Image: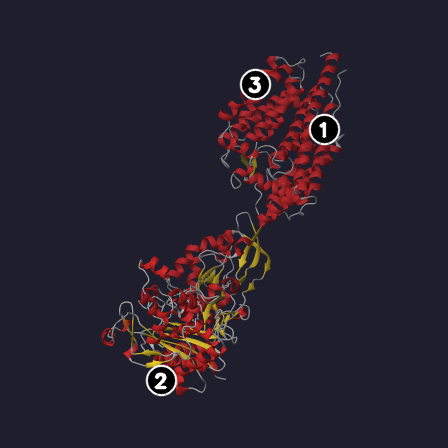
Amino acid sequence: MIKKIYLDPYIFIGISSLAMVGVLILFSASEGDTTIVLKQTIYVVLGLLLFLIVSQPDPDIYRRFSPLILFVTLVLVFVAYFFGPEINGAKRWIRLFGFSFQPSELLKISLPLFLASFLFDKKLPINAKQTVISIFFILACFLSVYIQPDLGTGLLIAASGFLVLFLAGLSWVFIGITIAAILIFSPFIWNNLLEPFQRDRIWTLFNPESDPYGSGWNIIQSKIAIGSGGFFGKGYGEGSQTHLNFLPETQTDFIFSVLAEEFGFIGVLLLLILYSFVLLRTFYLAVNARDRFCRLVIGGFIFTFGFNVMINLAMVIGLIPVVGMPLPFFSRGGTSLLSIFLMFGIITSMSTHKKFIPK
Amino acid sequence: MDFHERQLERQSFTQRSLLVASLLLIFIVVILFRTFSLQISNFTEFDKASLNNRTYSVPVQPLRGKILDRNGEVISENIATFDLVTTPRDIKDVDEFLEKIEKIIDLDKDEIDLYIKNFNSKAFFNRELVLKKNLSEIEIARFEVRGFEHREAFVGKRFRRVSRYDDIFSHVLGYTGVARENNLDEQNRFRSNSWRDAVFSYANGLIEGKAGLEKTYNQSLTGTFGIKQFEVDARGRLVKELSFTPPINGENILTTLDIDAQKVAANQLGRRKGSIVAVDVETGGIVAIYSYPTFSVNKMANGISQLDYEDLINDPDKPFFDRSVAGRYPPASTIKPLVGIHALNRGQISWTTKIDDPGFFELPEDGRIFRSWGEIAHGLINLNQALIRSSNTYFFNLAYNSGINELADDFEKFGFGRTVCVDCILEDGGLVPRPQWKMNNLNFGWFKGDTVNIGVGQGYISATPIQLAHYTAALANKGTKKPLFLNNSLSGKIPSSEIELENFNQRDWRLLHKAMESVVESDFGTARRIRDQKDFLIAAKTGTGEIISLDSREEYERIREDQGLRDHAIIVAFAPAEKPKYAVSVIIENGESGGSVAGPVALNILKELLKE
């Protein structure tokens, strides 16, 4: 007998609205491809189910099992790397029963969980040894994804780790030194560590007209799509940039441009309101969480999610270089969707369970 | 952790997450601001860019205007022909398709090769592709019967530029050909690569006038291109047609030409090299202008074999050369009325002044002899008699007693040495020589003898048939000079001018006309042969253009064996003499006698023009 269903109605409404709008936009972006949309819908339903399931247990379970969860995730990432199929030059998938599964997406959950469980009982500020251990895990996770290669996801995973570390009380001295070091070494990074195509992307951002049919094409067409949407948009399914293939990657990275073209500034505003609603609610939940572990996890999750959204948007409107980064709830891709639901499920679990105080 | 520490930790967390949250907030604000700038502030720019992306306008070719004669009869028009057009995108297997078509319509290897070469790209871009041009009626019928089987192919109407008179209007009419580059203003209305996809009305695609009237009036004949706007995707494939602005066909050109007169001209000249120009004296409109040898304009416009073309190019008689406007001939004795006017106007002679003609003229300076044609002695004669009999001695005298510059001035007043037609193409100005010209070009000083020769239209002077016609019309109009033209819409729009002759009055003109009438009517007239073949009066002047200068009749008989060296037969005439309507000039190369060879030709044209 289930005595009580743990559910935060605000989160539930927020994320299911986002998921539904996401499917709607994907339907247009995929030229009404029912196979793709049906698959995505199944993922949404599965996701909601998963969301409800992981909301129920007490968060202590996640704390206790977090090392195991991280370990399993990393194993899967390596399985994908060594045994998975190569798609578009990247090895990041595991195929199972006709569904592709991308374990690296799960690192966005397991790494913050692990770090929070490692740091939740440490004294403030975090000392050097703990910092080094944390960074070691962050780098390990980042590298395991970076080699696939998948820079976008890798950076997001690293960000999720550093966010937890920061929220847990990383010393300001350390932060200051790191920022100074990055500034000093950035020319070296630019010249030696970045691949030519990555340099190209950054260069193109500042000067897309220099190569309108090459590396500048995507960003130029994306800006045209968004700009030509105007205030009210061209109407659902009427975006010429989208449907005549001027816009690239409409189902993944550039799906926001589809929404902006067809629903205009009004649509963009509504989308941002929806995201902000979810972000604000979770921010409230983080601050009011029952203990330090939950605070750190919710904080790590939600800020990673927030940055993920903002980086994608900033990218497609031409504010920052194009890195492969899907838009949560919108971009096609089952694992990404499931991991987001998983994330919100854990958040719900952590915010709805009262602290058991031993007598 | 104690309570205090826990409090501190919570405080630190809240502060730090607020920091991160404000970072996110800044992000959101910037994104909102940027989106606003894209979608609201710069909407127009991006909307235009998006429209530009998805639309593709191709030109739709208009039909050229017809070229009509002065009665509105068609000289040149557009004839519909039929091509087998296919849409490669709908064809799954080319070889299978061709096999199917070949059962109905014969295809040669070139056609198949060309088709297969272009097939894939046309299929990819969803464009049409012509498989076979110019289907015969039988082929069309065979195809139509089985048409239901071939939805991917259809019979498309394509025009050809055709003249109803293949080779009698050739030089004046000109012909069309494939435009090498599009020089029209239209060019700027379309993207340059859209010409590749233009909807062509002509089987030959983009055509333009290459010669004659087709070239002169190419712009207005061409018309205005229509626009077919398609929606295209990012790879340039046509998705659907968005709009169609029909082309505006070119304007018809009503010319001053007269088909019947032109037919007579062609008929009369036959296979003799030469030229005929007839003009409407009242307007200056050219009613007939013919040059032989000629060529087929329809072959030139719609396909001529390499061999035929080379034959034309290498023909020593130069069929492409328009003798009427660019052939330089000595005007010979046809210039004599003008020399007479010149002498009368200067007060050098009067109509009663008599000069002895012993059959030759002796240059006082060095005793050089200038002979008359046939070396006939006319005795003491006045200007009237000198014109009728075409006495050389008389005009040698007049020229001798004038000066070359004075003569040249008057020649130029009558249009010699300059172009006389407003809308003819490649017109030559002929040559009115002056001492300076001779010095510059031949590096020799001017001799008095040079002036004497010019008195009878020989020597360095040369004129084109159209100049002679223009001059004759000026004589007929008693000194009113009218520029010649071909386009009827110019009628009355070109100002005519009075030739300045201070001392030459209406009586003089009447006497001059009388003298020219007598060239035909008098028993002594050089054109008396045509006297009895008509029911109206003709005023004329004959000429015999010498190709090389010779000293005696005997010498000419010797060189006469070479046909190419025989004299040119020339006549200029206007009629009806009392109230002139038409002026005509005829030059028959190596025809020898102006009166009896060129005369009947001129007569028949005037007869045709004056028939009720």
In the picture provided, is B501 more to the left or to the right than A253?
left
Q: Does mark 3 fall on the same chain as mark 1?
A: yes
The amino acid type, in three-letter code, at marker 2 is: Phe
Q: In this view, does B170 lie to the left or right of B29?
A: left
Is residue A293 shown left or right of residue A199?
right
> Does dot 2 land on a helix, a strand or a loop?
loop
Camera-side residue: A14 or B86? B86
Q: In which quarter of the image is the N terminus of chain A?
A: top right
Provide the chain ID for the residue under circle 3.
A
Q: Mark 1 points at which residue?
A: A282
Q: Which of marks 1 and 3 is in front?
A: 3
The Cα atoms of the two marked residues, 1 and 2, are separated by: 126 Å
Q: Looking at the image, is mark 1 or mark 3 earlier in the sequence? A: 3
Residue nearer the viewer, B30 or B259: B259
Q: Where is residue B467 in the image (x, y as percent from the top left)?
A: 42, 69
Q: Where is residue B435 in the image (x, y as percent from the top left)?
A: 36, 61
* Badge 1: chain ID: A
Q: How crowded is mark 1: few (under 14 residues within 10 Å), some or many (20 or more)?
A: many
Q: Specify the quadrant of the image occupied by residue A336.
A: top right
Q: In this view, does B168 lie to the left or right of B187?
A: left
Q: How far apart are marks 2 and 3 (CA)?
A: 120 Å
Could you tell me if residue A52 is visible in this image? yes
User: Which secondary structure lies at badge 1?
Assistant: helix
Do discs 1 and 2 belong to a common subunit?
no
As drawn, B313 above or below A112 = below
Residue A181: which disc? Answer: 3
